[in-house]
Structure formats: structure tokens, C-alpha cells
Image (cartoon, coloured by chain):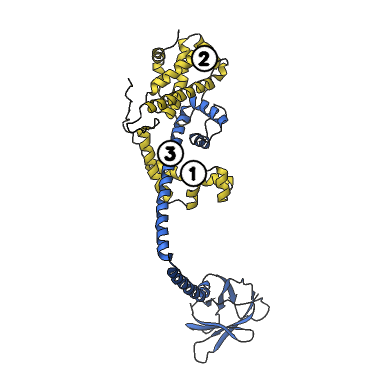
Chain colours: A blue, B yellow
Amino acid sequence: MNYLDHLHEDTLEAYVMGKLPENDINSLEDHLLLCEHCQARTREVELDWKARRIALQRVREREGSRLSVFHAVWEGMFGSPAKKTGWAMACATAAVAMFLLVPSAQENSFSYRNVDLSSMRGGKDLSAPVQPDERLRLHLDLAELDQLSVYRVVIVNASGDLVWEAEQTNPGDNKLVVAVPKRLVSGTYWVRLLDRSASRRLLREYPLQLQ
Amino acid sequence: MLATHDDLSNKCQHSSNQEPDHSEQPTAPIELNLQDLVDRIRAEDPSGMEELYRIFSKGVRFYLCRQLGAQELEDKVHDTFVIVVQAIRRGDLREPERLMGFIRTIVRRQVAAHIDVAIQSRREHMGLDGTPSLVDASCDPEENFIVQQKAELMEKILGGMPKRDREILTRFYLDEQPQDQICREMRLSETQFRLLKSRAKSRFGELGKKKLLRKPIQSVFMRKSASA
């Protein structure tokens, strides 16, 4: 450290805290003998340091008293074996409820993959790569189809077993967008568009291959 | 002729009236021609003593005030310069380039001597109940006021700070734990530690500049009654 060089704030801080090595103190004080700018900075650093200690002590005392209150409440709630048993039974009940509810909650925490479906014959690769945490948002082509206000959308697997179904309102732009919340494993599916009549007339069928 | 209090005061009056440099860019201390300065002091050249006082008085005053407080400060500063000049003329300073270290050593000895006197004085003037009355000699009422204001502001800022940042500051400033211990126990690298500490401190600085107003109050200057 050269006495001509102004002092870094970390150095000044170590000095006012009494943590500067002896060798560095000598050259620091040589500089302070001459430099009014660093004298003023030392004063500021020292005031800040004192204020910081006071503030931290007050915060610690406040947190300490909050912790004392917490301990008192804790003892009040769990201080006896009977209370502990009661709380254990309540926790077990809550765990069972969560076990039943969590799967449906998890259904809402996934992303959608957009898949365009049309009923063109031949040639086009209709397979869609889907990740395990993804769901499908199907874009069904309605061109040259009877325009109904509401369609019934049904998904069946390769064996013809029903996988999922729902009703969807026609937005009127020749494209029906259907969000399928159910997770579909890889395989071949058929997405069927039906009317809402009792006969459930098949209007269009789209092949879907999931990898 | 030995320099006296009056000599130094009279010769340096105009120097002490000089205003400090308020320019934004701090000027670096200039390299001193210490050989020339010491030669002039040894030759009892008034300009030598004048220049010595002009260059070093603020630094000596700063050091003594920080260690001993503002009480009787000017007397202590003058005593220090008298000792320095006498020592130079006596030939105690063999190497002029060591003048700063020489002055620093004399100032430290002055501080130690004053502390010894203060301790002795307190022992002799203990209260009737046998307990010593402890007074912080470095206690400046104006600075205390400023510290309390800053502490109130910092306390509010600490309340809104992430707990981890607060823990770092508490360990470093309040518990005075070394940096390596904090890094080890909180699993921080040195860079992370410096960054988090700097970030936490900068919050104080930003809000402090906006909200904190320095209100100079009239200094209360207390003197001990002279002992018989």
C-alpha cells in the first residue's frame, strides 16, 4: 500500500473494525495523515459501521422475542402427550385427504402440445411426439363439414375403446381447438367428431399417432 | 530556540483558516520533499514549521479526535507538533523520508499517554459507591445523533431484506465472524460472499442518501473540572 493511493472502502472498513493487519495499518495511517478525502470517508465508514451494529442488534432482539413467543405457542399446542396424539391424528387425516386430492391438482400443472389434425388421406405423417408431462391441444380441421354450433369430440384407442370425450363449441373459423386434459400414452388413436344427437352421427375421424 | 504553543499557533493561523478542497475528484496527496522540510525545521526556519503544520495538522487532528474525542483537541494537536519539532531538532529523526512514520509514532504515543492519564484519573475520581464513572471520550453528540438516525433507517431496510443477506451481515458485523468461517458455514464462495455483502450494504447507501438528512446540531462541549 502506497501512502499516495486513496483507500478502498473494504480496507477502511477493516480498519475501523480493527481487523486490518498491522503492516497495512501503518501505511493506511500514513495516508490518513495527509488525505482529507480519506479522513472524511473513514468517518463515514465508521458511522455506518456503528449504525449497522445497532440496527442488527435490534433486529436480532426483535427476532429473539418472536422466537420466544413461538416457543410458548409450541409448548401450548404440543406440550402434553394428549395434545401430541390429537395433532398426530389431525395430520394423518390431512395426509389421506391430500393423497386423494393431489392427483387432480397435478392435472393442472402441465403444458400443452399443439397438434394439427386433418382428415386427408395418405402420405402425411400424423405422428406427434409428446412428453410425459404434456397434454394435447388438438386443432381439428372443419373444412367442408356440416357447421354445427357444438360438436362432440371422442378419442378412442386402436382397439376402439373410449379414452376421452367432451363437447366443444364451434368458434366459426373452420378450426375446432380441443384441449385434452387426459394424459395419453404412446400409441394409435382416432379422434372422432360427432354431432350431439341421440344417434351420435360420425361427422369426421382423424388418425393420431403418439410416440 | 524551542518552538512553543504560541509560535505554532501564530505561524499557522492562516493555514488553519484554509478551506478544505470540495472538488468532486479527490486529489491525491502530493509527494513531499521531506528532506527539504526536515532541513528547514532543523534550521529553525519558520516556513518549515508552518509547512509541517499545514500539511499534517488535519491528519493529526483527525487521528487524535478519533482516538480521544473532541475534548481539548486543539491543545493535544499543538502538544503533538511541539514534540515532533523538538524531536526533529534534537536529531531523533535520522532519515527524513521516514517523517510520516515518525509523526505517526509520536501521535500514537500521545494517544497512549492520554489514555493512561484518563484511566489514572478515573481511578482517583471513583464515585462514592466505589464504581468508576465511565465516559466514552470519543463520544460526539452530533455523531451519536447521526448514528442513531442511520440505525433506525437500517433497521427498516433489514426488515425487508432476504433472511440470508441479513444473516451474512449479522455474522460479519455483529458476531464479527471471519469471512472464511461465514463462507464455510453458509456454503458460499468468496465471490458470492463479497457480492451478497456488497449488495446488502448498497441498499443502505441508496435509501440513506434519499431519506437521511444530516441536521447539524449545536455541539455540546463538556469539560471536566480541573482537579485541584
Name above or below for residue A54 compared with residue B65: below
- Subunit of mark 1? B
Name above or below for residue B176 compared with residue A130: above
The residue type indicated by label 2 comes to: Leu
Expressed as whole percent of the image width and height from the top left, the position of residue A127 reads: 65, 75
Secondary element type, mark 1: loop
> Circle 1: is it few (<14), some (14-19), or many (20+) Cα within 10 Å?
few
In this view, the residue in front, B199 or A33, is A33
Residue highlighted by disc 2: B37
Name above or below for residue A206 compared with residue B65: below
Reading the chain from its start, which is encountered first: label 1 or label 2?
2
Q: Residue at x 64, y 86 (%)?
A: A159
Secondary element type, mark 3: helix
> Disc 1 versus disc 3: distance between alpha carbons?
13 Å
Residue highlighted by disc 1: B175
Which is closer to the viewer, label 2 or label 3?
3
> Circle 3: is it few (<14), some (14-19), or many (20+) Cα within 10 Å?
many
Q: Quadrant of the N terminus of chain B?
A: top left
- Give me the disc on residue A50: 3
